[in-house]
Image (cartoon, helix red, strand yellow):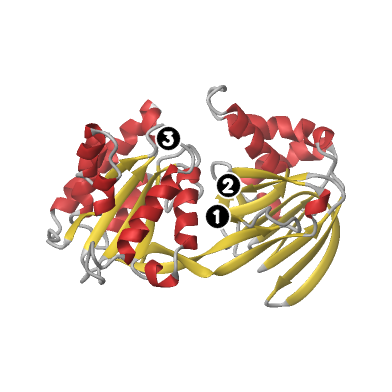
Amino acid sequence: MENFGRLMAGICAHALAAPGRPLRWIIIANPIAGGFTIKSRWKRNYAALEDYAERARKLPSREDARPAATASAAAATAADAALGCYGLVLTTGPGHAARIAEAVLAEAASGDVAPAEAFYLIICAGGDGTSLDVQCALYAAGPAVREHCAVLRLPFGTGNDGADAWEIPGALDLLTRPSRIEKARALRLLTSTPGKGPFLAFNILSVGLDAFVTHMTNRMKGRLPGDSYKLWVDIASLLYDRIYKVGPLDIRLTGEGGEAKLRETALLLAVGASGRRTYGSHKLILPDDRNVCLVRQMPLLRKLALKDLFTTGRHADRPESLLCNASRVEFSGSYPILAQMDGETVLLKPEDFPAAIELSDAVIPVLKTFP
């Protein structure tokens, strides 16, 4: 991990993000993420890092750029302290990325640690779980703190649907080319049960068959070789509605065009923070600007015939699919149904209904290229 930290620090020291402001960076990395542990991916990622480090050296050095103090303060061992000098902190388990992010946000809010005008770049190097943790911490921070921060999500996981690019070069371009700060929306899952939720997502929040696939993939992670998500898609096509009762959902859609009510026996219901989003390792569930996709229940043979269309978005014009735009999707049913939030799952029971998925205001600061 030292080489990773050294190369990333070299890139950050020349980064073009937030020009005119002192730059502080921290890299929160999951060392067991696929981008580090799968040899072929690490070899490809390392080559890209070397290339971009060389590109960065040709840019003017930023005298005002250095690692955030939190990176060294978070060190538990001498080895960790060495990585902290590069601004790199390794996560040790679920929730650790959120705690690191909370610490650096506290640093950003403290005039005692850095000048008030300093800009904090929080770089996630892991899978969707790492970026979910970090963005949850950003979401909980006050607006004044978020004005001094941005998150960059490097694709070091296995799926990387929530990253800023599917491959490392696209994400590193945001550091070595001029960029702007844009605020992204979050998704909230609300239930009728006190204390259960709200649950957050920043890419896609969905219920039904795809949440079952995510749940089983998480349970079997590390036990099955290869692309276990794809395996569970195949299994779920056969078994999902034998394990979970698929009954009618009463759905209320609210958006700029007003309100619509539906009653559908839904195989899945997916809501994105925007349109043109993927999940499940680049399955194009939202292929255009519409941010809601409902897929109706269908016979087994039809499921098998259509399942591969989701990779390319060709499901959108099939009669089993309904796509639209909505800022809030309320739903009720009579049977338990799984929900997934950027790869994390929760079981919704009848007493949790009505439940709702709603878009937040634009609050998460992210780096974007200029149009």
Residue 301: image location, x then y, percent: 82, 35
Q: CA distance from mark 1 to mark 3?
A: 19 Å
Q: Mark 1 vs mark 3: which is more N-terminal?
A: 3
Residue 279 is labelled as 2
| Residue found at x 38% / y 57% | 151
Q: CA distance from mark 3 to mark 2?
A: 17 Å
Q: Residues within 10 Å of mark 2 (few under 14, many from 20)?
A: many
The amino acid type of the residue labelled 3 equals: Ala
Determine which quarter of the picture holds residue 277.
bottom right
Q: Is residue 355 left or right of residue 33?
A: right
Q: Is residue 243 left or right of residue 89?
A: right
Q: Mark 2 vs mark 1: which is more N-terminal?
A: 1
Determine which quarter of the picture holds residue 231.
top right
The residue that mark 3 highlights is 33
| Residue found at x 73% / y 42% | 209
Work out whether 215 lies above or below 287. Answer: above
Determine which quarter of the picture holds residue 19.
bottom left
Mark 2 or 1: in front is 1
Instruction: Give SS at disc 2.
Output: strand
| The one of 109 and 9 positioned closer to us in this rendering | 109
Q: Is residue 95 left or right of residue 234?
A: left
Q: Mark 3 vs mark 2: which is more N-terminal?
A: 3
Residue 196: image location, x then y, percent: 68, 52
| The one of 199 and 158 positioned closer to us in this rendering | 199
| Residue found at x 61% / y 33% | 217
Is there CB contact under 8 Å for labels 2 and 1? yes
Residue 202: image location, x then y, percent: 54, 56
Mark 3 or 2: in front is 3
Q: Residue furthest bottom?
A: 257
Instruction: Give SS at disc 3.
Output: loop
